Amino acid sequence: QVQLIESGGGLVQAGGSLRLSCAASRRTFSSYGMGWFRQAPGKEREFVAAIRWSDDSTYYADSVKGRFTISRGNAKSTVYLQMNSLRPEDTAVYYCAATTFYSGENAYTYDYDYWGQGTQVTVSS
């Protein structure tokens, strides 16, 4: 069973930056795309960003457009999330996800069949 392993979370002041990484445990893992979601305490898991491998199209939630950038590594089993101009409302557990069955905007949790364990991002004011 393939695992998605996230890293890069932590504590940062408002206005700061963090870079999250996610890698599949098997380098030859094949998917249609990968994405990032986040979940704050007491809230639903929400879409943050996604990338589709077929044409490297990227998609973002309105709340992070212009501040976050999703990108992939050389292998299509690694994805990054560069987060700039962080705000306290960005505080959440961030989850990496991969889909092996759907190639669209992939903005919903049900579009994905593999999930990471999550990494905490805390932005202090």
Image (tube, helix red, strand yellow):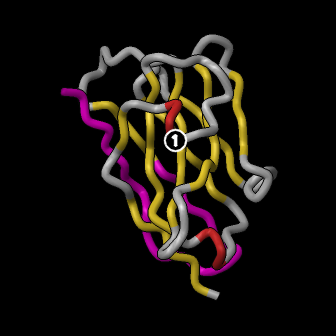
Q: Can you give x and y, in whole percent of width and height, for residue 46 in the image? A: 59, 54
Q: Quadrant of the image for the C terminus?
A: bottom right
User: Could you say which quadrant of the image residue 26 lies in?
Assistant: top left
Q: Does 98 appear above or below 119?
A: above
Q: Residues within 10 Å of mark 1 (few under 14, many from 20)?
A: some
Residue at 68 percent across and 13 percent down: it is: 55
Horizontal arrangement in the rendering, residue 83 relative to residue 97 (left or right): right
Q: Quadrant of the image for the N terminus?
A: top left
User: Could you say which quadrant of the image residue 90 lies in?
Assistant: bottom right
Q: Can you give x and y, in whole percent of width and height, for residue 14 in the image? A: 66, 79
Compare residues 113 and 51 and report the one nearer the observer. 113
Is any atom of residue 59 visible in this view?
A: yes
Q: Can you give x and y, in whole percent of width and height, for residue 43 in the image? A: 54, 69
Q: Can you give x and y, in whole percent of width and height, for residue 69 in the image? A: 67, 44
Q: Does 64 appear above or below 103?
A: below
The residue indicated by pointer 1 is 109
Compare residues 8 and 32 and report the one nearer the observer. 32
Q: Is disc 1 placed on a helix, strand or loop?
A: helix
Q: Residue 8 in magenta?
A: yes
Q: Does 119 appear above or below 123?
A: above
Horizontal arrangement in the rendering, residue 85 relative to residue 52 (left or right): right
Amino acid identity at mark 1: Thr
Residue at 53 percent across and 24 percent down: it is: 33
State the residue lying farthest toward the top: 54
Q: Residue 88 in magenta?
A: no
Residue at 52 percent across and 57 percent down: it is: 45
Compare residues 107 and 74 and report the one nearer the observer. 107
Q: Does 90 appear above or below 2?
A: below
Is any atom of residue 75 visible in this view?
A: no
Give the magenta-colored segment's residue range: 1-20
